[in-house]
Amino acid sequence: MSGNTFGHLFRLTTWGESHGSAIGGVVDGTPPLIQLSEADIQPWLDKRRPGQSRFTTQRQELDKVRILSGVFEGKTTGTPISFAIENQDARSKDYYDNMDRFRPGHADYTYQVKYGIRDYRGGGRASARETATRVAGAAVARKVLDHLVKGGVRVRGALIQVGPHKIDRKKWDWAEIDRNPFFSPDAAAAQTWAEHLDQVRKAGSSCGAVIEVVASNVPAGLGQPVFDKLDGDIARAMMSITAVKGVEIGAGMAAAELSGETNADEMRMKDGKVAFLSNNAGGILGGISSGQDIVVRFAVKPTSSILTPRRTVTADGQDVEIVTKGRHDPCVGIRAVPVGEAMLALVLADHLLRQRAQCGLK
Amino acid sequence: MSGNTFGHLFRLTTWGESHGSAIGGVVDGTPPLIQLSEADIQPWLDKRRPGQSRFTTQRQELDKVRILSGVFEGKTTGTPISFAIENQDARSKDYYDNMDRFRPGHADYTYQVKYGIRDYRGGGRASARETATRVAGAAVARKVLDHLVKGGVRVRGALIQVGPHKIDRKKWDWAEIDRNPFFSPDAAAAQTWAEHLDQVRKAGSSCGAVIEVVASNVPAGLGQPVFDKLDGDIARAMMSITAVKGVEIGAGMAAAELSGETNADEMRMKDGKVAFLSNNAGGILGGISSGQDIVVRFAVKPTSSILTPRRTVTADGQDVEIVTKGRHDPCVGIRAVPVGEAMLALVLADHLLRQRAQCGLK
Amino acid sequence: MSGNTFGHLFRLTTWGESHGSAIGGVVDGTPPLIQLSEADIQPWLDKRRPGQSRFTTQRQELDKVRILSGVFEGKTTGTPISFAIENQDARSKDYYDNMDRFRPGHADYTYQVKYGIRDYRGGGRASARETATRVAGAAVARKVLDHLVKGGVRVRGALIQVGPHKIDRKKWDWAEIDRNPFFSPDAAAAQTWAEHLDQVRKAGSSCGAVIEVVASNVPAGLGQPVFDKLDGDIARAMMSITAVKGVEIGAGMAAAELSGETNADEMRMKDGKVAFLSNNAGGILGGISSGQDIVVRFAVKPTSSILTPRRTVTADGQDVEIVTKGRHDPCVGIRAVPVGEAMLALVLADHLLRQRAQCGLK
Amino acid sequence: MSGNTFGHLFRLTTWGESHGSAIGGVVDGTPPLIQLSEADIQPWLDKRRPGQSRFTTQRQELDKVRILSGVFEGKTTGTPISFAIENQDARSKDYYDNMDRFRPGHADYTYQVKYGIRDYRGGGRASARETATRVAGAAVARKVLDHLVKGGVRVRGALIQVGPHKIDRKKWDWAEIDRNPFFSPDAAAAQTWAEHLDQVRKAGSSCGAVIEVVASNVPAGLGQPVFDKLDGDIARAMMSITAVKGVEIGAGMAAAELSGETNADEMRMKDGKVAFLSNNAGGILGGISSGQDIVVRFAVKPTSSILTPRRTVTADGQDVEIVTKGRHDPCVGIRAVPVGEAMLALVLADHLLRQRAQCGLK
C-alpha cells in the first residue's frame, strides 16, 4: 500500500538509500522448513554486483548479505526473514555540486515536488542501488518455487539488445550468458556491444537496452483474473525497475501486426499432455499461466547521468546547464538482467501461494 | 487480493460473466459530496457499447447502468457505490459446440486447468464483456479526478495502429476521434482500416491493434516508489485488459535505441513554471508523475475467435480442429480504446488519493 | 482498504443502505467446484430476518437472496459471487422528523462530521440492516470451511445475557437454541428475558446483551502472527458489528483475575492426540488456533433508538430533545447472534486459505 | 497480508526473534518533512524496557534503537524508515531443557503444529520481545499524529488492575503514572500490587492485569465503516499483543447491563461546539471517532512461565510435567501498558491518513 512492499502472500518490503548506512528488506510469508542460508542469496547478488567489468559503474560494493531473522537451524520458520546489505563505497561529494539542479531524466524533480525533500546523495531512494534488495528477496522466492514445484522453476534472463544492436536469436545459447560481461546469449553480439559501449562512453553519452527473461517449468494455473492477472503483475514488476519504459509478454507490441491464425497458439496432445505449437502468448492466456515458458521483455532507457551538458532548472527556478559526473553505468540495461529475473521470481512465488490458497497445488 | 478488485484507496470490485444475468461492480473509497448520477456513467458505456458499426460484434447490448447504493440526493456519501448492467443479448447456444474444445488463443484451457471448471458460455468471466464494468467504475474515477484537481484531469485515447497500418502522427487531431468508428485521430487512417478490416473479415481472419491513451493536467507527484510506481500500476492496468500483450510509457520499447542526450527530457523555466522540452518520459520520472502529459500505448493481439479452422485439443485429450462461429469483433483493439482510458482514470484516481494521504494535495 | 471489504483471501465486499433499493455483496476468492445455490444462503438469512417475534423490529423484510454471478451449473467457478437482497419494507418518513437531529448513541453525528453528508433514512449505511449481507457472505464461508476441512467446521452462537440476566451455564443445551426467540441455550433464561423485554419496551427503554459464538472442529494452525493473529482478526470482526463494545476470547476480561496455574490450559495425550484439560485460551494460543473450540463473547449495547426523550443537538448547532420513533429492536443483541456466527465463519474461511497458502493443509 | 505488517497507509512491518541477533521494523507511508531522530523513539523504548524494577523480567536489554533509512538531515523523506534494536542479553540455554515440551499457555504447541518448526529459544517470534518494535514504530506514529493534528494527539495508558486488585478510579491521577513501577494512576493501588506481586512470585505463580489506554484530542471522523471501523481496528490491535484475552471500548462488556437512556451519550452545544455529557461510547460511534477521548481497556492473562509444575506433553507424544525457569515477568500486564499505547497510536496514525485520503483533513 505504501509503495515499498511487493507481493500479497509472498511479500518483500525493502528500505534504504544509495548513500545511507545500509539497504535491506523483509520477506514475509515464506513457507516453513525450506533450507535457507546466506549462501543461497549471495550468488545472485554477486551476479548483479557493480564494478565487475568496465561496462558497469566502478562503485565497489561487496554486497554481502546478512540474514537477521526468520531462519532457525538452517531452515525457514515461517516468520519474517530480515536481511541487510551495508553500503561501503558511497561517494556523496560527487553529488553536492548538483544538489540544487534537477538532473534531466532522473527522479530529482518529481521526488522534490512529491515530498518537498529528497536525499540527493547518489539518487537516494530513487537510485538503482535499491534493486540489490530485490535480488536478495528474489533469492528466497526462488527457494520457494523450487520447494513447491516438482522439478523446480528456472528463471533466467538475457540482454538481447544494446542501443540499436540486437542479438541474432538463431544463435541463442544460454550457456553463453555467463561467458561475457553482458549476459548475452549470442557471443558475437557481446563483441559488438563492447565496441559500441566504448564509443558511447567516449562520446560522454549512454545507451538503452532490451532484456528478455524466461521462466521455465511454471505450473499452469497461476494468475488471478481479472485485475491480478499474471501478465499484469509481471508488467508492473518490470516497469517498477529503474529506467524501464516498455514491457512485452510473448509476441508483445508486435502482436498488433499478426493475423488471428498466426497469433493464436495451436494445441496438440503429445505424450498425453497438451503441447502448444508456438508461444506468441508468452505462456499466459487470460492472465493465467499455461505451462509454456513465460517470456517477458522490457526496454531500459539510456542512463540519464551523462557527461554531455544538458539544459535544466534549479530548485529555486533558475535556468542552468548540468553535467553529471560520478561513477555511472553507461548502459544500466546490463545490470537490469538479474533484476528482471528477480522480479519475475517474486511475481511467480506470490502467485504460486495465491494459487495454493484458492485452488490448492497438485 | 483475490483478483477482482482494482486499486487501494479508490477501489473497484467487479463481477459477472458474459452470459450471466448481469455484470456489475462496487466502487469503494469515493470522496463524499461529489455530484453523481447514472447520467455521469452512461455516456462512457455508450462509447464502448458493441454493435455500433460493422467493425465490432453485432451482439446488441444497451448497457444501461443502474446505481444501487452510495449516492444520496444526487451526491456521493462516501459509502460504496454499487452498480449493475443487465446482460440482454447473450446467445449461449453458439458456444455449446465448442464447450469441450479449447479455443486457441483464448483462456479456455487455462481457466479449465486452474479452476477445474469454467463457464464456457461466451467466454464466461474471461470475456471482454467484463470491461464494461471497468468503464462504469472509471466514470466515477473521472468525477473524483475532476473534483479534486483544479481544472480537471482529461483522459482520452485513440487507436493508432490496426494490423500493419499506423496513423500519421503529424495528422493527429483529437476532434477526429468521434467522427469515425475507430477512435482514429487521423481520418485517412480510418479509411485504410475500414478497407483492411473488410478484407480481414472476408478472409475469416482477425487483426491486432495499438492504442494510445493520454492524460492531461495530471498533478505532479503521483506514484509511490519503489514498487507502486505510477508507470508500474499503469502497465499492470493495461495488461489486465483482455488480449493486451505489450505496454509502453513515453518512448516505450524504442527508448532502447535512444542516446542519453536525446532521451532525457531537458527542462526550462517558462512563465514561472518548470517546462520540459520533450516527453520521452511519458510524464513519469522515477515512478512519479512530472506534470507532463502521461502517454501510454498498448498492443492488442488479434481476436482469437476466427472462422479459419485451427488445431486444438479437447478436455478429454483428443486432437481436433475448431472453428469459432458467433458474433465477434474482428479487431478487439477498437473497443479497447475506451477501456484503456478507463484503466488510466482508475489508476490516477487511486494514486491521487494515495498522494493526498501521505503528502496532502496542494 | 476502503472499509467495505472484509478478509484477505476469502473476501466479502458489501454495499447498500437501509432504505436504498437493495443491499448486497461480492464474495471473491472462493475455491472452485463447491456446490452452491441460493438454498445454501437463504436459511441463514431467515435466521437473522426481522419481524419473527415481538422482541425484534416489526419491519417486514423477506430477505430473499439472489446470486448473480460466480456459480455455474450449481458449482462455484472461482470467480466473484455477487448477490443482492431487495429492500422491501423501508418506511423513510419515520426519519424525516429527526433528519437534522443527531440521535444520541447513533452514528448520525460522526457520519455527518466525517463525510459532510449522510443518508439519514433508516440510518443509511450505519444501519444494522447491512449485517444481512454479512450473513449471506458467511453462508459461502461455511461452504468453504466444510469443503476444505474434514468433518466440517461448526460455527454456532447463543445469547447468554440480556440486560442483567445471565443464563445458567450448567443448563446449556444447544438444542434449545432453536426453540425460543432469543437463541438462548437455557430455556428458563429465555422466559426471564421475555418478561424483562416486555417491561423494557413498556418503559420506552432498551437493553444490552452478551453473545457467545463457538466454532468446533477448527484445524490447529490458523492465524498469522504477529499482527494478523486469529484472535485479533476475530476481535476486529466482532467489534465491527453494529453496537458491539467489548470482545472476549476464552477467559476474556476475567483472565486478569486468574492465577498462572489456573489459566494455562494443561495438556495430556488422549487416543494418540493432544488433549487440553481446560479451555481458558478459547482455542487460540499465540494467535494460532490450537484445535480446541474457539470461544468468543461480545457485548452489545442497548438500542439507541428509544421513546424516552433525550438531549441532543441539531446539525446547525441548536440544543434540542429527541424521541426516536419507528420500528426498532428493543434489544439488538438478539439478532446479533447470527451475525456473530457469520463474522466468525468469515474470519475462519479467510485464515484457512491463508494457512493453505503458506503452510498447506493436511 | 502475511501477518507481520500492521496498518494500511501508515504501515509497520516488524521482524525478529527473542534470541536472534536483533529485532527491528520498517515504517512505510510516513508523510515527509517531519523532524525525526533516534531521540524521538528511545524514550518510549526506555519506558517499556525490561529490568527496571523487581516486578519485571531481569533480562538486561538496553534496547538502543538505530534508524537505518528514510531520514535525511533530520527529517522524514517519505521513504521507508528502517530501524533495528540489538538483542544483547539472550540466555538461550534456559530453554534447552524444555525444547521438546510444550509450555502450557504458550504458543509452543500451536507454532509447532502450524509451521512444523519453531525457534524455541526465548519463545522465538512468539516472545513479547517483539513488542519493542511496536513501541519503536509507534514513536513515529506519534510524530505523524502531532504533525497533522493541531494541538497534537495524546496517547497514554495506565495499569488499572493487577490480579483481583483494581484501582480506585476516583483517585485517578495521570501524574502518578511515572512515579511507580506499575504505571498506576492510583498510588495506593501501586502499593497493594507490590505486595501482591511479591506473594505471587514467592508462590511460583503469576497474575493477570487490566490496562486502560486513552487518546485525547483525536479528530472526529476517523474510521472506515463498515468493516474497518476504528474500534474494530483498535480491538484487533490490542488483541494482537501477547497474552491479551479481552478488549473493551468505553463501557465495554458492561454495556450489556446499561439501559438505553443511560448508555447513549447525550449532547449539548458548549462554546459553539458539540459536547457529550458522558462517554459510554469511548469516543467512537458507528466505528467513527466522535472527538471525545478514545477509551480502550484490555485484559492480559497471567504469565504462562511459572515455577509451579504443570502437566503437558512432548513433541513426540509423551505425557510429562514441566517447570518453566528463566527470567520472566510475574505480571506481563505491567509492560503491556506502553505496548497498548503504541498500538493505539499506530491505529490512529493509519486512520488519520485514511481519512485524509478520502475526505481530506480540515
Image: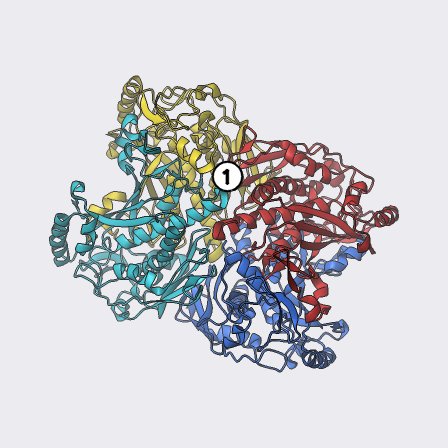
Chain colours: A red, B blue, C cyan, D yellow
Q: Left or right of B218: which side holds D93?
A: left
Residue drawn where x is 21% and y is 65% of the image:
C58
Q: Is residue A145 above or below residue C89?
A: above
Residue B3 in sight here: yes
Q: Left or right of D289: which side holds B322?
A: right
Residue drawn where x is 16% and y is 47% of the image:
C186
Q: Amino acid at mark 1?
A: Val
Residue C7 in picture, x, y percent from top left: 43, 51
Q: Left or right of A68: which side holds C337?
A: left
Q: Chain of mark 1?
A: D
Q: How many marks?
A: 1
- In the rendered image, which quarter is residue A342 located in? top right
Q: Is residue B238 above or below residue D4?
A: below
Badge 1 element: helix
Front position in the image: A338 or A151: A151
Q: Residue furthest top?
A: D202
Q: Is residue B241 above or below residue B41?
A: above
Front position in the image: B103 or B24: B103
Residue B82 in picture, x, y percent from top left: 43, 66
Q: Residues within 10 Å of mark 1 (few under 14, many from 20)?
A: many
Residue wearing tag 1 = D140
Residue A167 in sight here: no
Residue C349 in picture, x, y percent from top left: 40, 50
Residue C66 in picture, x, y percent from top left: 36, 67
